[in-house]
Amino acid sequence: MPRKTAEQKVAAAGLGYGVLAYLIWGFFPVYFKALGGVPALQVVSHRIVWSVLFLWLIIVWRGSWRTVLSAFRDRRAVALLTVSALLIATNWLVFIIAVGHAQVIQSSLGYFITPFVSVLLGFLFFQERLRRLQLVSLALAAIGVLLLTIQYGRFPWVALILALTFGSYGLFRKIVSVDSLTGLTVETLLLGPLALGYLIYVSYQGESVFLSQGVQTSSLLVLAGVATAVPLLLFASAARRLRLATIGFLQYITPTMHFLLAVLLYKEPFTQAHLASFLCIWGGLCCYSYDAWRGMRAAR
């Protein structure tokens, strides 16, 4: 009985971390729309560089720099974190490009698909059993993507890249044997030299927008490090405490917020093709949610 109670506390903490992370991410289109005049690669580079500084301040304050050094000595951890770092950097870049090109609806589609990617990865790597309703939900999601492809005559690459990179990022963060703060610090340190080198290069070329487009833009670029690190720390903490299927269940908080912002605030066109695709995916999410709720009720 005490062990069960401890497990319940861990799961409850993971649930709280996950919900808060996804709520913060839900407002990201607003934040990065304000940086619309900055090239996407510069925004991503600033996110990385300022995240390194912010996270290192936390590491020094907590006195846990030895843990970071220990992680760098673990070849397996470094290899896994290198892959996860490349996945999340790709995700950031594609998302910022999508926001800058008024494709928030397609980015929301990508994050709606991510739960299904998480379910598949859980099945493939952790033998998390796929129940009948989960299979139905996966089939509906695939039909939704297929309908959008047929209607538009082109593959929704933005949506699928976002789904695959973020779903895979959750997988790697779950299996790497370091805590969330250490893992994220190592990831940003691995990416940091590339990001800093690129920012120095564009500054040398006279193409840098930092300190040249006003206080507001420069401040947003600096604060992007905090805005990046905080929800990722929360997400990594959640991923280590929850099943991938549960992470997938929480995931659609963010795309719902993105979708509402795209349609209601940014007035992006929402066509019949979008409607057919989203209805299939929302139907899949309903099936998945009902199955998850039924499973949790049976467990209790």
Image: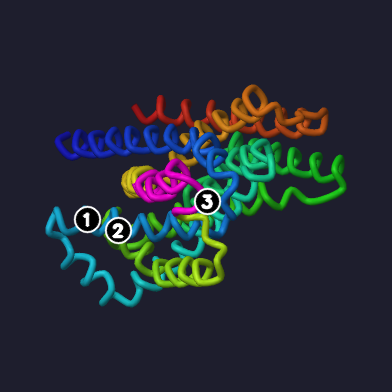
Image side of residue 196 versus residue 70, left or right: right
| Predominant secondary structure, magenta span | helix
Q: Which residue is mark 2?
A: 53
Q: Which residues are magenta?
A: 211-229
Which label was assigned to residue 151?
none
Image side of residue 101 versus residue 23, left or right: right
The answer to which quarter of the image holds residue 216 is top left
* Disc 1 secondary structure class: helix
**Which x, y percent locates residue 240?**
33, 49
Image side of residue 216 versus residue 40, left or right: left
The answer to which quarter of the image holds residue 74 is bottom left
**Which x, y percent locates residue 65?**
18, 64
Which label was assigned to residue 57?
1
Question: Residue at horizontal 35%, vertical 55%?
Answer: 51
CA separation in Å, label 1 and label 3: 29 Å
**Which x, y percent locates residue 244?**
45, 46
222 vs 137: above or below:
below
Q: Quadrant of the C terminus?
A: top left
Q: Nearer the viewer, residue 54 or 23?
A: 54
> Quick one: label 2 or label 3, which is nearer the N terminus?
2
Q: Residues within 10 Å of mark 3 (few under 14, many from 20)?
A: many
- CB under 8 Å between callouts 1 and 3? no
Please tell me whether residue 125 belongs to the stretch shown in magenta: no
What type is the residue that disc 1 sits on? Answer: Leu
255 vs 68: above or below:
above
Q: Residues within 10 Å of mark 1 (few under 14, many from 20)?
A: few
Q: Residues within 10 Å of mark 2 (few under 14, many from 20)?
A: some
What type is the residue that disc 2 sits on? Answer: Leu
- CB under 8 Å between callouts 1 and 2? yes
Q: Which mark is nearer the camera, 2 or 3?
A: 2
Q: Residue furthest top?
A: 264
What type is the residue that disc 3 sits on? Answer: Gly
